[in-house]
Image: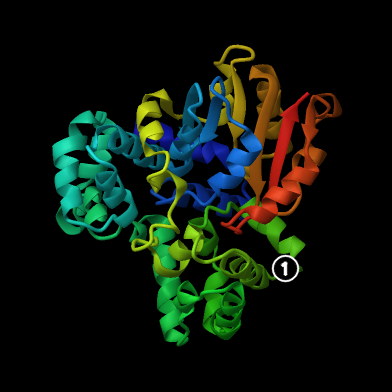
Amino acid sequence: MSELVCEDLVKNAVSQSGSRRGLKDRLFSFWFDSFVYNQIWEDPRVDLQALELKSDSRVLAIASGGCNILSYLDQAPEKVVAIDLNRYHIYLTRLKLAALTHLPTYDDFFNFFGCANLHANLERYQTYLCQHLDDATRNFWEGGNWIRRTVMGPRINYFSSNLYNYAKLGYLLRLVHSLTRITRKDPSRILKAETRAEQEKVFNETIAPFFDSKLVKFVGRQPLVMFSLGIPPHQYETMREENSGDVIDLYRERVRRLTCEFPIQDNYFAWQALSRSYDLKGRQAVPEYLKQCGYDVRKQCADRVETVVAPLTDYLRRQPDESLDRFVLLDAQDWMKPQQLTELWTEIARVGRPGTRVIFRTGSKTSPLERALPTPLRSRFFYDQKLSLELHGQDRSAIYGGFHLYCKE
């Protein structure tokens, strides 16, 4: 797929107008048409509880960084379609699938994506992986324009200098860490905490005051900060309204949840936010797809994943009736207008088998479907609000306002 076509897909996914909001939409679509996420920020443990995958499950999931696509393979579903508007995220997903399939050992795989900072990873890429990538994916990791080739080097070098320092989110976290040094705070102290009480104490001493800095407040309110978090303008405005117009307090509260409400020894999201790395020594605070348990099953099932660059609704229109039964929409619906939501869920209702389960997250607390969908369409799905709230409370990422599960009646 050409770069111009991919750029159009992203632009068309974000509502635009001639207003100031329209200008922000266009800026977001430009910013998002790049390598944004170096890992996914949705907790796969929560996903798997809600999805209840079986051996005949056929999954359609937005890929993002590809981590959870591989995590779903633990349950050996029949098929997983990894779809994304952002071709760069698909390139990362394809690299992970190639590595899972062709790297000779679990340790090779862990070192490539868990450590992601070893020169030996470049040798692994040349020896085992590059020849198994399609041309577009290989060009992404090895090629680029002349500026990248001569000044920055190919992107595959990320894996010898810490992948998690790169992509838009990595750059944002590096900026945040620079601000912590300027404000003389060291939030990484939490990683050494042995109890939740210690985590709370360090948060109150280091992170909570960090958000009181005038410099942090100024930076935190800039559009490029929210764009680097993958938050489109409409979602950002909704989050502001729910928090009396002050996103700084919202950031503070969600970081508190991230760093205090779950044991730090197990929360790889917090490790990534605070150190831009995982628990490489104990290998406990690492993503599910990087754990040795389940590695053989994931490896055997890697060929069940199909990767697609396309809008969700357009892809679904091309699928037969009742051909899928699990849908993972991430927070994509926060981008959509009511008409777009109606079109998407009309296709989910047609393509979904009986017993279909659909999960998604929202920046705000409430599900947009309760107001957006026409009553006849809405009535075809059961909203499991109780379980949704329970699972939201278990999401170690803690960056979203809501988790939602809908089941086809």
Please tell me whether residue 78 is drawn above or below residue 5 in the rendered image.
above
Residue at 31 percent across and 38 percent down: it is 95
Residue 210 rendering spot, x and y as whole percentages: 55, 81
Residue at 43 percent across and 66 percent down: it is 173
Residue situated furthest top in the rendering:
320
Q: Is residue 332 visible?
A: no
**Which residue occupies the foreground of this view, 408 or 200?**
200
The quarter in which the C terminus is drawn is top right
| Drawn side of residue 303 relative to residue 160, left or right | right
- Secondary element under disc 1, as helix, strand or loop, is loop
Residue that numbered label 1 is attached to: 245
Residue at 48 percent across and 41 percent down: it is 68
Please tell me whether residue 226 is drawn above or below residue 296 in the rendered image.
below
Residue 317 rendering spot, x and y as whole percentages: 59, 18
Residue 124 rendering spot, x and y as whole percentages: 18, 44
Q: Residue 14: which quarter of the image?
A: top right
* Residue type, mark 1 in image: Gly
Q: Residue 296: which quarter of the image?
A: top left
Total count of labels? 1
| Drawn side of residue 90 relative to residue 356, left or right | left
The quarter in which the N terminus is drawn is top left
Q: Is residue 221 visible?
A: yes
Residue 167 rendering spot, x and y as whole percentages: 37, 55
Please tell me whether residue 195 is drawn above or below residue 46 in the rendered image.
below
